[in-house]
Image (tube, rainbow, N blue to C red):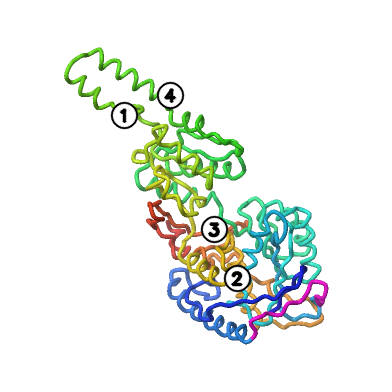
Amino acid sequence: MKYFINHTPKILSIKFNLIITFLFILWVSLSGVEASDFKAISRQNVAQIIITSEKNNKYIGENENPTIVYHNTIISSKNVEVPRVAILLPLSGKYKKLGQSMLNAAQLALFHFAGKDFELLPLDTKGTINGARVAGATAIREGAELILGPVFNNAVKAIESITSQSGITVLAFSSDYTVAGNNIFTMGFLPSEQVRRIVKFSIERGIRRFALIAPNNNYGQVVYNALRSTINLYGATLTSEVLYDTNTKNFSPIIRGLANFDMRQRMLTQEKSQLLNQNNNAAKKALLALNGVQTIGELPFDALLIADGGERLRSIAALLPHYDLDPKKVKMLGTGQWDTGGLGSEPALLGGWFSSPSSKGRREFVIRYENIYGETPHRLATLAYDATALAAVFAQSNKDDRQINSLAKTQFFRDMNITSPRGFLGLDGIFRFSKKGYVERGLSVFEIKMRGIKLISPAPQNFFSQDKG
């Protein structure tokens, strides 16, 4: 295998365990049998992939420093009879740490799954629209037959006209489903899927009234639309919603209003006044019971979906008890943005539920990545791993079946059954691509605990069971 790079030469030293002890990617559609036989298929195909991987890792073990061919010495694809895949990432600029983490993950997948006749071409988008456009044009000019990336939706839009003219397939890392189509497939985690999963799970457990707090941006709008459509589908109710400016620093007025705090506090004051006027033992006992109570009166919702993460989520969570939003009475819900660890330190979020991809494969990947690179991978690194592994598996499966003409462009990826309804198995669980180009994933539901998260509803093992559900 070869790397093509266009920056300062450096020695790439990779050390890793040659025996793959967990699953990374599975092309279920190769089996050619029905979805009901998924488990048997999984075991059979996994064994085949592990054998291939161990064989390829022995090749890597013989040459720990893979060949590096510099960008200005790339041979024209017309003289190359191996599949060439470009990966478009922000390797410089504001998002270079993200880009490097994803490239590291792609390299791991390359070593685990690709044969020696496989070429990966990393191209720097610089985190800009123009950088993405240049990288896309370079990928096509240098003979790439498949493009992995870019990451951001505006970068995907920037290369669309270029890739559509060439007919090349793109596996983008964006979570914006609106950029999918025209041979562009998005692999990013869709918030709409996460909302549907957590809301359906909540409704099945008796929750009927929902409230929403989300940022007033594209992400928040997607969440809002998904929430409305899901609760309408199942006959539930959206009683309150707040979409806040992403520049908001003080969330107190927002939470105060959402909790109807002032009205409920006035109700408490009125109740105390009435009890004082009664001047009897029963009233005195009732008055005593109200000591320490902030408000009275029920909230108009049973669950609050907080569609945010990071510092904004923590700021919101810290205010919930202050305005008498009791997590014992209101179930706190979240999306995959809650899947960051450490939320157990927020009392208001304890016992809260959120939906996210299966964590088992990712946990093992993180350990392996940290052992090799000495740092924790970015959350999106698994997308680069799965995309690269998928490309390598497709390339190997097509290699033996093709009559390769050395005078014409090879077509290792032209017959990709990318929209197989059986889907694939990756680090984040099962996934497949719709005919419209966006990804569909099997999602788990987790509960926030003081020392971590607990799996309370596992992701489906195959799309047959998910489609039935």
Tell whether 67 sits left or right of 15. Answer: right
Q: Disc 1 marks which residue?
A: 292
Q: Residue furthest left?
A: 281
The amino acid type found where label 2 is placed reads Leu
| Helix, strand or loop at mark 2 | helix
Q: Residue at x 38, y 25 (%)?
A: 264
The amino acid type found where label 3 is placed reads Glu
Mark 3 or 1: the one toward you: 1
Task: First in sequence, mark 3 or 2: give its number.
Answer: 2
Mark 4 or 2: the one toward you: 4
Cα separation, mark 4 vs mark 2, equals 55 Å
Q: Residues within 10 Å of mark 4 (few under 14, many from 20)?
A: few
Dots 3 and 4: beta carbons under 8 Å? Answer: no
Q: Residues within 10 Å of mark 3 (few under 14, many from 20)?
A: some
Tell whether 371 sits left or right of 81. Answer: left
Q: Residues within 10 Å of mark 1 (few under 14, many from 20)?
A: few
Task: First in sequence, mark 2 or 1: give its number.
Answer: 1
Tell whether 94 sits left or right of 44. Answer: right
Task: First in sequence, mark 3 or 4: give its number.
Answer: 4
Part of the protein shown in magenta: 63-76
Cα separation, mark 3 vs mark 2, equals 16 Å
Q: Nearer the viewer, residue 31 or 274?
A: 274
Could you tell me residue 62's position as x and y percent? 62, 87
Q: Disc 3 marks which residue?
A: 440
Mark 3 or 2: the one toward you: 2
Mark 3 or 4: the one toward you: 4
Cα separation, mark 3 vs mark 4, equals 43 Å
In the rendered structure, find residue 390 and report the number of the disc placed on it.
2
Q: Disc 4 marks which residue?
A: 262
Dots 4 and 2: beta carbons under 8 Å? Answer: no
